[in-house]
Image: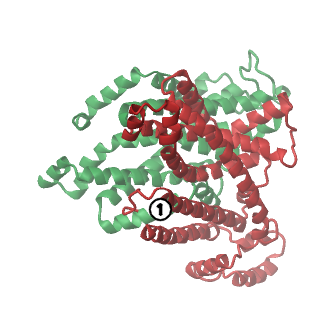
C-alpha cells in the first residue's frame, strides 16, 4: 500500500512536466511575442526597436526555447506567474481571489449535484423499471443533453424575470444561488446515472442476496449493505467530475458575471493576454492533478482490498 | 459474439434491425435524420436568406412570415436554425474524425506495437488526461487563436486520450485471442495483424465510445462559440447565435430559446441514439 502511494506520487512528475511544457507553449508558440503585444502602436519604430531588444533580453526572449523554459520553471517554482499585459499587474494577485470564487461555486455545485444525484440514482436502482426509475432516468437524459449556458439563461428568465424570486443583478450570497443551482442541477444528471448503475451492479452481488435470504428488509439491505460500496465508486467519479465541473464553471461564470478564474480565462484569451491565460491554465491543471492524487490516496485508505499491483 | 463479429455485413444488418425495434433509437434517429436532411437541403428548405438583415423588423415574435421570429438585426431565426444544422454536422464529424483517427492510431501502436512506443504514448496520454478537457481546449485555442476551425481542432485533440486508452486496452485483449495467434502462425505481418485482425474487432467498442464522446464534443463546441472562442457571429452557428441574443433575454426570449432548444434537441437526439446503440452493442451495460 505504501509502495502504491509512492508510485502514484512519482507518476505525478511526468504529468507536471507535461503541464509546464504545454502552458509554456501558450506563450512561446504565439506569432507575436509579449513585448510587441505590450507596446504595439504606442511608440515610434526607432524607439520600439531599441526598447524591444532591451525588454526581450530582460524576459530572456532572445534565448533558445529550452533556456526560456528553464527560466519559466524557475519563476513558477518561486510563485512568480508573470505580469498581465492588460491589467498591468502581477497575475498572481488577480488570480488569487478569483480562484477562491471559482472554488466556492464548484463546491456548492458539487454539493447540490451529489445531494440530488445520489439519492435519485439510488431510488431509481432500488425501484428499477418502475415509474420512478423511468422518470429519474428521463430527467437525467434531458440533463446530460442540456447545454449549461442555455440552462443558465433559462433559470435567469424563470427565477429573476417571471417569478421575480431573485434580483436580476444579485449581490452577496444571493449571487451564488443561481450559478450554483445551474451547475449543480446539470451535474446531478451524470451523477444520478452513475449512482444508479453502481447500485444496480451492487444489488446483484452475493452478499446482498445473502442478506435478503436472511429476511432483512429491502431498505436495510440498501442502506447498510449496498450503499457503502456504491459510495466508494461515486467518490472516484466525483474526482473525475471535478474536471467537468471546472469546465462547466467556466461557462456559468461568464453567464452570471461571477468573478472566478473561468470568466477571467475567457477574457484573457480574447485580450490575447498570454501570461494571464498561461497562469490560469497552470493553476487549474495543477489543482486538478492534486485533487486526483488526493482521491486516489483516499481510495487506498478507504478500501484496502483493491489490487494496486497494476497501478 | 465473435462468430457474428467475423461476418461484418450480417452483423451490421443485425444491429440495424435491433435499432429499428428500439424506441429510443427511433426517436433519436428521427431527430438526427431531420438534422441531416436540413443540412443537406438547407438553401431549399429555409424560407429566407439566413444572413439577410432587415432592421425594420428587429426582434419580432414568431409569425406566419417568420415562423420563429427574428433576431436583433431582423434576420429570420428559422432560416438561421436550418442553416445552423450544417455547422452542427460539420462539428460532430470533424471533432470525431480528429479524435477517433489519431486516438485509434496511437492506441493501436501502443497496444500492438513495440514496448518503447507504448511507454512513450501512454505517458503522453497520461499528461493529456491530467488536464480537464476544458483546459486542454483553452490552451489550444490560446495558442492558435479563436475561430471555428480552432475550436473543432481543440475539442478533437481534447478527446484523443479517451480513444487512445480505449483502443490500447481493446488491442491488448484481442492480441491474446486464439484467432490472432492463428493469423500470426499463418505468417501474417505485425502490421497486417494490427489493421487486418485487431482493428475490425474493436469497431464495436469504438462505436460505443463515440456514442458518449460525440454529444459531449458537440456541446463543448457550442459552448466555445457561445463564449466567443469558436464560430464567430454573424455565422448562423447555434452557439454563436446566442452571443448577441443573450442581451435580449428579457425582451425577446424567442431569440434565445430558438438556438438553445435546437442545441438541446440535437444533443438529445445523439444521446438517445447512443443509448440505444449501447444497449444493442454492449448488452452487459443494460
In this view, the residue farthest toward the top is: B64
Quadrant in which residue B68 is drawn: top right
Quadrant in which residue A118 is drawn: top right
Task: Kindly identify which chain the residue marked by label 1 belongs to.
Answer: B
Left or right of B123 in this view: B135: right
* Residue labelled with disc 1: B126
Give the chain coloured red: A
Residue B80 locus on image (x, y percent)? 67, 30
Q: Nearer the viewer, residue B142 or B260?
A: B260
User: Is A167 drawn above or below residue B273 in the view shown?
Assistant: below
Can residue A2 be seen here? The reply is: yes
Left or right of A291 in this view: A47: right
Left or right of A7 in this view: A113: right
Which tint was used for chain B?
A: green
Left or right of A250 in this view: B278: left
Residue B169 locus on image (x, y percent)? 35, 53
Q: Secondary structure at mark 1?
A: helix
User: Is A78 drawn above or below residue B236 in the view shown?
Assistant: below
Residue B119 locus on image (x, y percent)? 37, 67
Write the residue at 16% across / 54% down: B184
Amino acid at each position: 500500500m505504501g509502495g502504491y502511494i509512492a508510485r502514484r506520487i512519482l507518476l505525478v512528475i511526468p504529468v507536471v512536466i507535461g503541464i509546464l511544457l504545454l502552458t509554456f507553449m501558450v506563450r512561446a508558440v504565439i506569432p507575436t511575442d509579449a513585448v510587441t503585444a505590450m507596446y504595439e502602436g504606442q511608440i515610434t519604430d526607432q524607439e520600439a526597436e531599441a526598447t524591444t531588444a532591451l525588454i526581450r533580453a530582460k524576459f530572456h526572449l532572445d534565448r533558445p526555447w529550452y533556456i526560456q523554459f528553464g527560466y519559466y520553471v524557475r519563476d513558477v517554482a518561486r510563485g512568480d506567474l508573470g505580469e498581465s499585459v492588460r491589467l498591468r499587474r502581477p497575475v498572481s494577485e488577480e488570480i488569487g481571489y478569483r480562484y477562491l470564487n471559482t472554488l466556492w461555486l464548484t463546491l456548492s455545485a458539487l454539493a447540490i449535484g451529489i445531494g440530488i444525484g445520489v439519492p435519485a440514482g439510488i431510488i431509481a436502482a432500488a425501484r428499477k423499471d418502475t415509474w420512478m426509475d423511468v422518470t429519474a432516468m428521463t430527467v437525467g437524459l434531458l440533463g446530460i443533453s442540456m447545454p449549461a449556458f442555455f440552462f443558465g439563461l433559462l433559470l435567469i428568465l424563470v427565477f429573476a424575470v417571471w417569478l421575480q424570486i431573485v434580483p436580476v443583478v444579485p449581490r452577496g450570497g444571493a449571487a451564488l444561488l443561481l450559478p450554483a443551482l445551474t451547475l449543480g442541477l446539470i451535474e446531478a444528471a451524470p451523477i444520478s446515472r452513475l449512482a444508479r448503475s453502481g447500485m444496480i451492479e451492487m444489488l446483484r452481488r452475493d452478499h446482498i442476496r445473502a442478506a435478503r435470504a436472511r429476511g432483512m428488509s429491502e431498505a436495510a439491505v440498501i442502506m447498510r449493505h449496498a450503499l457503502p460500496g456504491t459510495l466508494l465508486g461515486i467518490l472516484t467519479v466525483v474526482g473525475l467530475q471535478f474536471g467537468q465541473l471546472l469546465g462547466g464553471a467556466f461557462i456559468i461564470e461568464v453567464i452570471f458575471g461571477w468573478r472566478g478564474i473561468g470568466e477571467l480565462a475567457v477574457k484573457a484569451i480574447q485580450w490575447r493576454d498570454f501570461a494571464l491565460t498561461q497562469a490560469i491554465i497552470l493553476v487549474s491543471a495543477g489543482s486538478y492533478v492534486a485533487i486526483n492524487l488526493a482521491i486516489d490516496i483516499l481510495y487506498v485508505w478507504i478500501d484496502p482490498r483493491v489490487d494496486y499491483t497494476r497501478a | 459474439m465473435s462468430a457474428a463479429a467475423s461476418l461484418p455485413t450480417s452483423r451490421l444488418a443485425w444491429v440495424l434491425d435491433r435499432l429499428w425495434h428500439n424506441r429510443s433509437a427511433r426517436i433519436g434517429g428521427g431527430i438526427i435524420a431531420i438534422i441531416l436532411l436540413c443540412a443537406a437541403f438547407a438553401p431549399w428548405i429555409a424560407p429566407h436568406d439566413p444572413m439577410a438583415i432587415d432592421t425594420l423588423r428587429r426582434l419580432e415574435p414568431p409569425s406566419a412570415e417568420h415562423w420563429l421570429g427574428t433576431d436583433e438585426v431582423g434576420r429570420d431565426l428559422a432560416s438561421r436554425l436550418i442553416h445552423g444544422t450544417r455547422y452542427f454536422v460539420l462539428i460532430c464529424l470533424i471533432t470525431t474524425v480528429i479524435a477517433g483517427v489519431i486516438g485509434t492510431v496511437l492506441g493501436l501502436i501502443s497496444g500492438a506495437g513495440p514496448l518503447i512506443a507504448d511507454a512513450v504514448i501512454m505517458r503522453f496520454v497520461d499528461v493529456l488526461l491530467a488536464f480537464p478537457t476544458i483546459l486542454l481546449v483553452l490552451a489550444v485555442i490560446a495558442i492558435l487563436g479563436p475561430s471555428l476551425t480552432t475550436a473543432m481542432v481543440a475539442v478533437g485533440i481534447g478527446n484523443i486520450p479517451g480513444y487512445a486508452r480505449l483502443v490500447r486496452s481493446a488491442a491488448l485483449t484481442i492480441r491474446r485471442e486464439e484467432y490472432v495467434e492463428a493469423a500470426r502462425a499463418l505468417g501474417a505481418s505485425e502490421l497486417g495483424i494490427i489493421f487486418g485482425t485487431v482493428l475490425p474487432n474493436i469497431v464495436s467498442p469504438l462505436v460505443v465510445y463515440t456514442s458518449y464522446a460525440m454529444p459531449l464534443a458537440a456541446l463543448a463546441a457550442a459552448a466555445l462559440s457561445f463564449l466567443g472562442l469558436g464560430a464567430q457571429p454573424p455565422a448562423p452557428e447555434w452557439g454563436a447565435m446566442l452571443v448577441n441574443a443573450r442581451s435580449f433575454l428579457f425582451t425577446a426570449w424567442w431569440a434565445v430559446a430558438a438556438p438553445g432548444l435546437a442545441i438541446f434537441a440535437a444533443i438529445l437526439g445523439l444521446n438517445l441514439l447512443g443509448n440505444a446503440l449501447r444497449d444493442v452493442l454492449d448488452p452487459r451495460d443494460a
